[in-house]
Image (spheres, rainbow, N blue to C red):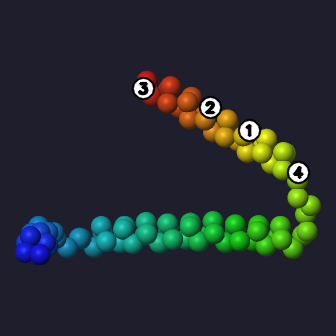
Amino acid sequence: MKKFFSEVTRILRITKKPSKSVFLMTLRVSFLGLVLLGSVGFIIQIIGLTIVTARIPRPPPDIVIMALISVAIVILAVMMYLRRGRGT
């Protein structure tokens, strides 16, 4: 417990108050992230609500599996291509 308090006091001694410009930039970035995540969540909610209320027939399970496998292959191919471009 004593070590914990000494670590806390050490951290409090070396930290400093950010300048106004740094604080405002952090505030803007945080707000932008909040708006972006909220917008994505809202869009997903609207799409889900539309699918539920539209009574769209379900596709057969084998088609869904093939589509998911295709998406996974495309994602892996893009990742391998990008990794090859970095030279690693």
In this rendering, would 13 be left or right of 25?
Answer: left
In this rendering, would 56 be left or right of 81?
Answer: right
Q: Which of marks 3 and 1 is nearer the N terminus?
A: 1
Q: Which mark is residue 23?
A: none
Secondary structure state at the residue bearing disc 4: loop
Residue that numbered label 2 is attached to: 77
Residue that numbered label 3 is attached to: 88
Secondary structure state at the residue bearing disc 3: loop
Mark 3 crowdedness (10 Å alpha carbons): few <14, some 14-19, many ≥20? few
Question: At label 3, which amino acid type do we have?
Answer: Thr
Q: Residue at x 36, y 68 (%)?
A: 26
Q: Residue 60 carries which label?
A: 4
Residue 9 can be seen, yes or no: no
**The N terminus lies in quadrant:** bottom left
Q: Is residue 62 above or below residue 55?
A: above
Question: Are the two marked residues, 3 and 2, in contact with CB atoms closer than 8 angstroms?
Answer: no
Residue that numbered label 1 is attached to: 70
- Give the foreground label among 1 and 2: 1
Nearest the eye: 83 or 4: 4
- Give the foreground label among 3 and 4: 4
